[in-house]
Amino acid sequence: MPHPLNPAFARTFAPPVMEARRWLEGVVFPSDRPLINVSQAAPVDPPPEALRQAIAEAALNDPQAHLYGPVLGMPELRAELARQWSLAYGGTIGAAQVAITQGCNQAFCAALATLAGPGDEVILPTPWYFNHKMWLDMAGVTTVPLAPGAGLLPDPEEAAAKITGRTRAIVLVSPNNPGGAEYPAELIRAFAELARHHRIALIVDETYRDFDSRTGAPHDLFADPDWARYFIHLYSFSKAYRLTGHRVGAIVAGEDRLAEIEKFLDTVAICPGQLGQIAALWGMLHLSQWVAGERAEILARRAAMEQAVGTLEGWDLLGCGAYFAYVTHPDPRPAPEFARALVREAGVLMLPGTMFMPTDAEAGARQMRIAFANVDTAGIAALRDRLAAYAHP
């Protein structure tokens, strides 16, 4: 490389999904056995037609849709999220406690940028969402892994033992990516009390909250009048409304925290995209029934996935929920080698557990993530048949 490279970037692994896509290069999939792609958790269909029409009308008729907007997002969208979340969680959230971001990944980066710097520590349960780990590495922040217990649930007592004077935050993702686990409300509350006691932040990424199988609020943190002192909530509009390309996410946090986050957002993006925000607001106001139908479909696919894995000899289901099944595989080869072989020999693309674990974690070599949200029940049955018929060496 002819120019200097930030050593923190040099230590950061390459984007896993892009690496997996390279496994497809030069592979021909016959027409009677097309590729089954269960590698990425993102909708592949466009938004519903009514939402696309709203985007088109805004693009044609609203001059503001093409201009800079407020750094922390459109006031109307911030207010609507605050209103709906206050009702859903049984708490009190003000519009001034909401920021809109260019996707939930940016929400995470912005929040962490205000919390931790080089030499600080953040506790991250495993298996982790790899982009969270990548940001911490690029920022020079030490990731402290927290191994899961039964059901892929992290243990607050084990987390407490890992807290040091350099710990700045604990990060949870529920429903979990990559494990699919839905964290019980009492578990999230226990982590919140831990964070409050040690004066650190609890960050809960709820990107997949719209596909939680449970009814009611997934936790009661917003019901605490002092939630803003220790709790930061992250959300993505991409999954609920199929707005992945528009990059719309959100942070709910205390106003003092958002004042610092505003510095980050102004520097990296100036403001979130206007059309995406317009689409998210329209979706919140008009698509609740449609989202309920999407949730029902994902839950049906989840049930099909659980049944399919249950019939596969040597495969064990560690967790299943939202868009994901997290499994152990029976192949004698390590997961990365097995994953590449599945592409060539079975026409299946899925990610190995090593992409979600520390490099020295032996468990990752036996694990795989199956992102089933873009595969209907017939496709899940076909996936099951291919894995069952796969000839192990």
Image (cartoon, rainbow, N blue to C red):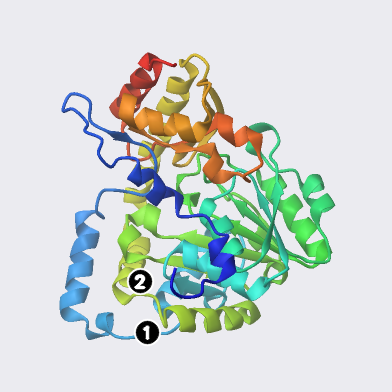
Q: CA distance from mark 1 to mark 2?
A: 10 Å
From the image, tell me which residue sits under label 2.
277
Question: Residue 113: where, in percent of width, then height?
Answer: 60, 73
Reply above or below: 318 against 208: above
Reply above or below: 96 against 333: below
> Where residue 150 is drawn, which disc sits there?
none
Marks 1 and 2, the one that precedes in the sequence: 1
Q: Is residue 368 left or right of residue 199?
A: left
The answer to whether mark 1 and mark 2 are in CB contact below 8 A is yes
From the image, tell me which residue sits under label 1.
69
Quadrant, the C terminus: top left
Q: Quick one: SS at disc 1? A: loop
Residue 326 shows in the view: no
Q: How many marks?
A: 2
Q: Quadrant of residue 354?
A: top right
Question: Residue 263: where, in percent of width, then height?
Answer: 54, 84
Please name the amino acid that badge 2 sits on.
Answer: Gln
Q: Is residue 326 left or right of residue 282?
A: right
Reply above or below: 53 against 4: above
Q: 287 or 142, which lies in front?
A: 142
Q: 236 or 189, which lies in front?
A: 236
What residue lies at 40% left-to-right and 26% top-to-bottom?
304
Q: Is residue 4 left or right of residue 91?
A: left
